[in-house]
Image: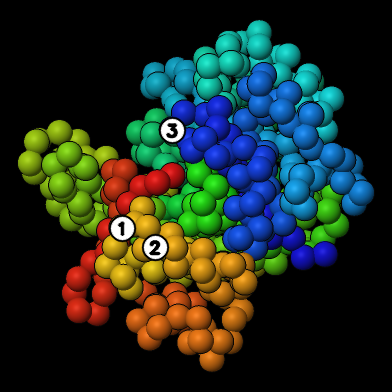
Amino acid sequence: MKIIADLHLHSHFSRATSPKMNLEGISEGARKKGLNLLGTGDFTHPKYFEELKRKLLPSDNGTGIYEYNGIHFMLQVEISLIYQQGGKQRRVHHVIFAPDFEAAEQINSMFSKWGRLDYDGRPIFGKSSMEFMDALMALCPDAFVVPAHAWTPWYGIFGSMSGFDSLKEAFGEHVRHIHAIETGLSSDPAMNWRISELDNVSLISNSDSHSPYPWRLGREANVFDTKMTYKDITNTITTRKGFEYTIEVDPAYGKYHYDGHRNCGVSMSPEEARKHNNICPVCGKPLTLGVEHRVEDLADRPAGYRPKHAVDFIKLLPLAELIATARKRSLSSPTVTKEMHQIMKDYSELYVLTEMPEDEIRKIADESLAELILKNRNQELKIKPGYDGVYGEIILESGAQSSLLDFS
């Protein structure tokens, strides 16, 4: 069956999340987006775990998949590891998938000995990635671990500020248990294809959403053709058989694509940053080096290289950004929200963005919005790159820009 999956998100028990990030809000957002499989987020949080056990029903389609309000779920959590290795402080995030509630309960019991689970939906532990994998694989060999937003400067496994130069360096012998990494908003598969080490892992894309609104949930996703079971989905990710493609935002849209300093208003390409010795010309401190810079540092292949068994991808910006651009309003504007709900009353967002015939698009949208939808579909939008926590911006033909505000 065709599965459109966003496998990394958070609940209302995580910091800086919408109170609507509960099963009701998440499932409703998924339906509007056009998703049929989600990660639960935050299964380590005691209150949320009880909510999941109480409300999720086992799916008829197989083990390890649960259902609520017509949407399927996999048990998922993101954890933060902060530790010293190689004379440097490391800060990395990992996504964990559990095969069932019993396994998740065992994982929670183990983590509760490492630190508190009740203060945040994304717990923090002072363990290395190797120690974490040692313990997890001994306890639950069927757990599936994916380094989260792998290139983010501060918390990505390859991040310029606290990451590693290779998966082997981070995981040691447990690198054999790492079958995928998450590309994150600021990189796409083509950028990752330049790193030969990553030929051995699959590239998955998820929203890491903190809000159920359709412009956040599913902004990145995965499309599989497989059975709706935990084993089949993790096997599809691992082998890439039945892994059809990923949905990506343009990496320039991401908050860490270019180098820069948010507080100084400085944004630079990697080439420009190197001319300044990676130092901010305003404050004189080191720039936050973005994903493009970091990929260039680690790449052992030229841009445009495509590995033999690479999974395809498409690039899309969410519909809300297009409406905000067409109406010259912010994402939080009631005008944008109203128009989003009007369109999605009858159609899912992904259908409008990828499949709706052009003549139908022109019936539901005026000329300015219809053109943006079609340019988005045809990869013709131009983006001013994001940097140091600032989202990218759509560049209009007139030269004006539309601010893509952060409501994650």
Q: How crowded is mark 1: few (under 14 residues within 10 Å), some or many (20 or more)?
A: some
Looking at the picture, which amino acid does disc 2 mark? Val
Q: Relative to the observer, which residue lies in front, 148 or 395?
A: 395
Question: Is mark 2 in CB contact (under 8 Å) with mark 3?
Answer: no
Q: State which tag comes first along the sequence, 1 or 2.
A: 1
Quadrant occupied by the N terminus:
bottom right
Does residue 187 appear to the left or right of 129 in the view shown? Answer: left
Q: Residues within 10 Å of mark 3 (few under 14, many from 20)?
A: few
The residue located at (36%, 53%) in the rendering is: 332
Where is residue 369? Give x, y as percent: 39, 78
Q: How is the image coloured?
A: rainbow
Q: Mark 2 sits on what residue? A: 336
Where is residue 323? Give x, y as percent: 39, 69
Q: Relative to the observer, which residue lies in front, 105 or 284?
A: 105
Residue 221's place in the image compared with 357, above or below, is: above
The residue located at (67%, 19%) in the rendering is: 46
- The CA distance from mark 1 to mark 3 is 20 Å
Residue at disc 3, secondary structure: loop
Looking at the picture, which amino acid does disc 3 mark? Ala
Residue 67, by quadrant, is top right
Q: Mark 1 sits on what residue? A: 330
Looking at the picture, which amino acid does disc 1 mark? Ser
Where is residue 367? Give x, y as percent: 38, 86
The residue located at (58%, 16%) in the rendering is: 118
Q: State which tag comes first along the sequence, 2 or 3.
A: 3
Where is residue 34? Give x, y as percent: 65, 63
Residue at disc 1, secondary structure: loop
* Residue 16 badge: 3
Question: Is mark 1 in CB contact (under 8 Å) with mark 2?
Answer: yes
Q: Which of marks 2 and 3 is in front?
A: 2
Q: State which tag comes first along the sequence, 1 or 3.
A: 3
